Amino acid sequence: MGVCGCGKSTLMRHLGKALGCVGFEGDSFHGEANVAKMRAGHPLNDLDRWPWLDRLGAAIGEAVRSDGIAVAACSALKRSYRERLEQAAGVPLMFILLDGDRAAFAERLSRRRGHYMPPSLLDSQLATLERPAADENAVVLPCSWSITRLRDAVLDRAVNRTAV
């Protein structure tokens, strides 16, 4: 989880490969209206997000019930979004916040090509972000870590239940 440009999709792909499981790109679960809204530079609101979170959560839950595990890349910026995802999945979820500063995210976004999410929406995502609370099943990791270090930290936490 995290704002645009934090590296969620890259981490999701590496985790999926390491775990031999399906990986869901949350962006592909947005409806056409959401994509058009973001492409036009308008941030989504909660009403825009609920159906998207329900579709993604249902896919995650189905995969977990079928295969035992799944990974997904999703902004999940608010606690209510994380709760909605878990409710839609019907299985316990673990969240990884890829954290960093605005400058790091903006620099990454400047290199990203072919994505409908414009860099101009970064500030609205940062304003919306609610860091996971201590009672959530979540880990905060710096997006500045290498993808290998991030992957290994998540795998260690998920498999061995150790602190990172």
Image (cartoon, rainbow, N blue to C red):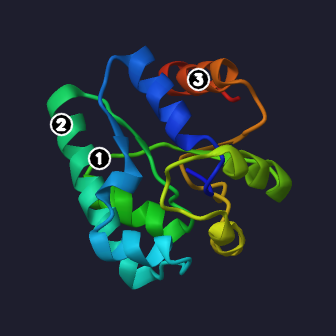
Whether pointer 1 and pointer 2 mark residues with C-beta atoms closer than 8 Å, the reply is yes
| Residue 105 x %, y % | 74, 52
Nearest to viewer (mark 3 / mark 1): 3
How dense is the environment of label 3, judged by Cα within 10 Å: few (below 14), some, or many (20 and up)? many
Residue shown at 68% from the left, 51% from the top: 109
Residue positioned most to the front: 114
Look at label 2 and name its amino acid. Answer: Arg
In terms of depth relative to the viewer, which is nearer, 41 or 24? 41
| Lower position in the chain sequence, tag 3 or tag 2 | 2
What numbered label is drawn on residue 16? none
For disc 2, the marked residue is 65
Look at label 1 and name its amino acid. Answer: Val
For disc 1, the marked residue is 91
How dense is the environment of label 1, judged by Cα within 10 Å: few (below 14), some, or many (20 and up)? some
In terms of depth relative to the viewer, which is nearer, 15 or 67? 15
Residue positioned most to the left: 66
For disc 3, the marked residue is 151
- Above or below, 12 relative to 57: above
